[in-house]
């Protein structure tokens, strides 16, 4: 297997965590005999400063000619006064649109060892394993018209979906549910929004193709509560773009830290992989960032772009083992009554590499 991976590390903690993810991938490649070819390009704030645009043409061209794009994070406080289309985040939205992936898979898995790290009671979170499928190219993020009309003091964005845009992401969610626990929860606000009524109707239509999957509908406000009260009841959760953005940050509470969550965006020309967390400028460059979300994102690259299931599973097993042994990053120490060892970003990366090496060599 030969995979060409473009790394767009971005801003803040992005470079630190993607370095660790890449190092783990290189370790796995060296042992398993697969060739991973890496290239690096700028995106986000660093690109605004150096190239005058959050998504340089060179980065986009390199992305389109890769097999996968691994992104760190974008954003920084120094860009807060810029208009949305000039900000680092615009670079991310542009690359998402150009690569065309519309199904953003965000697994929220509660590692047993981190249950004490969640502000929720361990008996609520233990065993929770949700796969969010967030529609990534529609809704308020991309709908037109959009404008802040300063003269009239009005601003508007448009939540827009077509039936086909809903159906294609629903189909991916149903397929994933088929190989999991065969339950799909579709999230909408159909008691208020027409676009949610279309969403629900389209999901119901697609459900007829998947009679083995149980479908339920939840309103987004109720869902925000259910995820906290009974996270174990959910398997695959299908949402539109903004609802998914909000609910997946919320679900970090189940896993113990936002730093644990990986994501993969599939369905387009080139898959895009990014941890769910942001650029965390307050801790950037200090070795405090948790690289496990990025490392788990690397596992998703192998699974979804390389078809390398065993290697992906080995990375995931290594993360679990490292947590079992008690190693933590600073975000994972709430309720750490035993005084478990707290590692820096690079130390945590090294632990995962050492563990994955042992796992793969002994396999
Ligand atoms: C995410 C982020 C992005 C989003 C931002 C950085 C544009 O919050 O990936 O969840 O809103 O999609
Ligand atoms: Mg978000």
Image (tube, grey):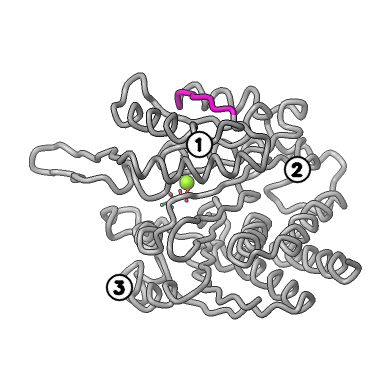
Q: Is residue 125 above or below residue 279?
A: above
Relative height, residue 126 to residue 17 (above, below): above
Q: Position of residue 84 (x, y in %)?
A: 29, 53
Q: Earlier along the polypeptide chain: callout 2 or callout 3? A: 3
Part of the protein shown in magenta: 214-220
Q: What predominant SS class does the magenta segment belong to?
A: strand
Q: CA distance from mark 1 to mark 3?
A: 48 Å
Front tag of 1 and 3: 1
Above or below, comparing residue 152 to residue 346 in the picture: above
* Residue position marked by numbered label 1 in the rendering: 209
Q: Earlier in the sequence, mark 1 or mark 3?
A: 3
Kindly identify which residue carries mark 2: 111
Spatial distance from mark 2 to mark 3, Cα to Cα? 41 Å
Q: Which circle's residue, 1 or 2, is located before the other in the chain? A: 2
> Residue at position x 68%, y 56% from top?
292
Expressed as whole percent of the image width and height from the top left, the position of residue 307 reads 65, 64
Mark 2, secondary structure of its residue: loop
- Residue 343 lies in the magenta-colored region: no
Label placed on residue 52: 3
Task: Tell me what residue is drawn at x 34 percent, y 53 percent.
Answer: 80
> Whole-Å distance between the Cαs marked 1 and 2?
33 Å
Secondary structure type for disc 1: loop
């Amino acid at each position: 297997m030969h995979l060409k991976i473009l790394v767009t590390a971005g801003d803040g903690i992005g470079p630190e965590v993607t370095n660790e993810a890449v190092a783990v991938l290189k370790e796995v490649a060296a042992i398993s005999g697969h060739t991973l070819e890496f290239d690096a390009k700028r995106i986000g704030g660093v690109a605004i400063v150096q190239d005058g645009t959050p998504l340089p043409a060179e980065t986009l061209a390199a992305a389109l000619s890769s097999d996968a794009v691994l992104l760190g994070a974008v954003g920084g406080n120094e860009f807060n006064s810029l208009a949305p289309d000039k900000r680092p985040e615009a670079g991310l939205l542009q690359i998402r649109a150009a690569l065309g992936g519309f199904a953003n898979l965000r697994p929220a898995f509660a590692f047993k060892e981190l249950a004490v790290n969640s502000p929720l009671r361990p008996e609520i979170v233990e065993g929770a394993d949700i796969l969010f499928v967030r529609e990534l190219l529609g809704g308020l993020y991309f709908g037109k018209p959009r404008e802040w009309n300063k003269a009239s003091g009005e601003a508007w964005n448009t939540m827009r979906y077509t039936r086909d845009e809903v159906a294609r992401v629903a189909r991916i969610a149903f397929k994933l549910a088929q190989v999991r626990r065969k339950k799909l929860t579709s999230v909408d606000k159909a008691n208020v929004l027409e676009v949610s009524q279309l969403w629900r109707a389209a999901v119901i239509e697609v459900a007829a193709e998947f009679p083995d999957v149980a479908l339920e509908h939840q309103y987004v406000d109720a869902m925000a509560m259910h995820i906290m009260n009974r996270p174990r009841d959910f398997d695959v959760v299908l949402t539109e773009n903004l609802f998914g953005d909000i609910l997946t940050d919320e679900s970090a509470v189940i896993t113990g830290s936002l730093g644990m969550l990986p994501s993969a965006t599939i369905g387009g020309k080139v898959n895009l992989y990014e941890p769910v967390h942001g650029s965390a400028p307050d801790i950037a460059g200090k070795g405090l960032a948790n690289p496990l979300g990025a490392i788990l994102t690397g596992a998703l690259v192998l699974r979804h772009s390389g078809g390398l299931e065993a290697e992906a599973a080995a990375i995931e097993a290594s993360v679990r083992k490292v947590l079992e042994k008690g190693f933590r990053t600073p975000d994972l120490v709430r309720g750490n009554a035993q005084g478990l060892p707290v590692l820096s970003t690079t130390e945590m990366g090294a632990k995962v590499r050492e563990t994955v090496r042992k796992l793969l060599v002994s396999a």
